[in-house]
Image: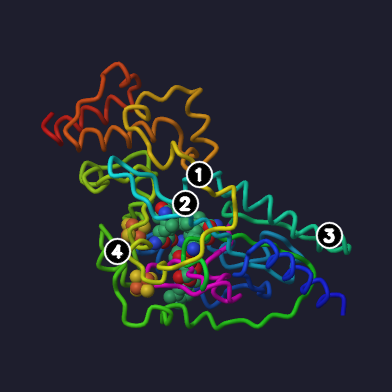
């Protein structure tokens, strides 16, 4: 059968690329998940970063009308867990922007399907698909108590990408009802203990209190600024705490090799960023919230360390407002 032949070709190509965590799922409407998503919305636990139109969120075909199958693929990005003591970017931002990298690779795989005359569309984060749910059902990885998709070889340090196609392929799917059981974790609760805002431990948790969101949010409170503690963008605490991330394989993807300026950031340099210098941050996953946000986050860390920044760099109303608040907060 043509479908099986194409599926085998895709699997071979993925394995050749070192992409060992992937799976297949039938496109459908996730009617069973609607109540859960409604409850989260009612309890006001969502961020503006996720799809909040629930009709779209549960109807997987809204991204591609005649799609029959979704291929879920994990893209590993882990190189090492080095942490720069004078302020650090989260590990997922250290290499080239994953949206671009994942999309490029997905296109190559999707071409295998297109060459046989079938339509295929690729997705890398910027979509309404519940990517972790799909990854669980397809068998790409398992959901931990930190809500990350955890793969066997690369742990949770993976990005997710999908290909949707009108081609109907065989699938062997996992039951979505297993998700809240977090079987992969056993009795472990390390991430729950380590989380700085203590949001883990329930399926109904406040994602707006996740430090990853707070560090990327343009408007934050004084209380939130006190929680940064070295973070410049994103948060890895629940992944660093996870024993399933020990002895994992290094990413085979050269694009994700950490850039030196991301691994060893200079707070002074970040605060003094010019538009020209900002270009190199835009090439990573840390640039999408703009230059001012990186400057603000660097200023938070500088002032937390008791250092007064050079006022010539506090040159916008946005930065001035945060500077004034930080002066009061840290008695500087
Ligand atoms: C919004 C968002 C965020 C928000 C909210 C995160 C969150 N926990 O929801 C913020 C900004 C905080 C964030 C942070 C991070 N993010 Co983010 N984020 C997203 C985005 C765009 C949507 C996620 C979403 O819908 N969240 C709502 C929650 C409820 O859904 P979920 O956890 O994604 O999926 C669960 C539900 O669908 C649930 N479910 C569905 N039906 C039902 C029914 C019942 C009854 C139950 C109980 C559950 C259930 O099952 C899924 C698994 O638990 C996705 C991309 C995408 N399109 O999916 C990336 C994504 C989840 N993020 C990603 C990453 C890498 C991160 C960070 C690690 C970045 C960092 N280092 O700072 C952190 C991790 C924080 C954490 N522990 O979750 C990756 C995750 C890869 C992986 N291995 O899991 C994704 C998939 C992007 C990608 N394409 O690679 N993110
Ligand atoms: S990313 Fe940080 S704040 Fe968010 S759940 Fe994990 S440990 Fe908690
Ligand atoms: S730290 Fe423990 S509980 Fe948390 S995801 Fe990892 S194995 Fe699961």
**Can you say which quadrant of the picture contains the C terminus?**
top left
- Give residue 177's position: percent from left, percent from top: 49, 82
For disc 4, does the CB lie below 8 Å from ligand 2?
Answer: yes
Q: What residue span does the magenta drawing correspond to? A: 128-151
Q: Which mark is residue 285?
A: 1
CA distance separating discs 4 and 3: 43 Å
Whichever of callouts 4 and 3 sits on the residue coming sooner in the sequence is 3
Binning the other alpha carbons within 10 Å of mark 2 as few (below 14), some (14 to 19) or many (20 upward) gives many
Q: Which mark is residue 199?
A: 4
Q: Residue 252: in sight, yes or no?
A: yes
CA distance separating discs 4 and 1: 24 Å
In this view, which residue lies farthest toward the left?
331
**Depth check, front residue: 73 or 77:** 77
- Give residue 104's position: percent from left, percent from top: 68, 50
Q: Which mark is residue 114?
A: 3
Q: Which mark is residue 216?
A: none
For disc 3, does the CB lie below 8 Å from ligand 1?
Answer: no
Marks 2,1: beta carbons within 8 A:
yes
């Amino acid at each position: 059968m043509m479908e099986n032949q194409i599926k085998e070709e895709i699997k071979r190509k993925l394995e050749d690329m070192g992409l060992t965590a992937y799976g297949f799922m039938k496109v459908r409407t996730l009617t069973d998940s609607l109540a859960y998503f409604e409850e989260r919305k009612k309890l006001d636990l969502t961020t503006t970063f996720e799809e909040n139109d629930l009709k779209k969120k549960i109807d997987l075909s809204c991204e591609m009308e005649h799609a029959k199958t979704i291929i879920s693929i994990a893209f590993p990005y882990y190189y090492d867990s080095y942490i720069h003591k004078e302020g650090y970017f989260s590990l997922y931002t250290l290499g080239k922007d994953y949206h671009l990298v994942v999309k490029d690779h997905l296109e190559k795989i999707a071409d295998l399907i297109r060459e046989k005359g079938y339509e295929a569309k690729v997705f890398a984060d910027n979509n309404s698909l519940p990517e972790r749910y799909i990854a669980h059902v397809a068998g790409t990885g398992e959901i931990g108590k930190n809500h990350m998709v955890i793969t066997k070889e690369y742990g949770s340090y993976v990005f997710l990408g999908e290909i949707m196609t009108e081609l109907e392929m065989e699938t062997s799917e996992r039951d979505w009802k297993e998700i809240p059981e977090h079987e992969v974790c056993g009795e472990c609760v390390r991430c729950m203990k380590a989380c700085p805002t203590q949001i883990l431990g329930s399926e109904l948790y406040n994602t707006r209190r996740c430090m990853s969101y707070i560090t990327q949010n343009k408007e934050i409170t004084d209380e939130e600024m006190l929680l940064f503690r070295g973070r410049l963008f994103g948060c890895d605490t629940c992944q660093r705490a996870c024993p399933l991330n020990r002895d994992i394989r290094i990413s085979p993807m050269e694009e994700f090799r950490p850039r030196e300026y991301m691994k060893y950031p200079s707070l002074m340099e970040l605060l003094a960023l010019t538009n020209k210098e900002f270009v190199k941050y835009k090439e990573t996953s840390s640039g999408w919230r703009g230059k001012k946000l990186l400057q603000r986050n660097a200023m938070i860390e500088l002032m937390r360390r008791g250092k007064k920044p050079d006022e010539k760099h506090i040159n916008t109303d946005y930065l001035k407002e945060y500077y004034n608040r930080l002066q009061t907060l840290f008695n500087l």
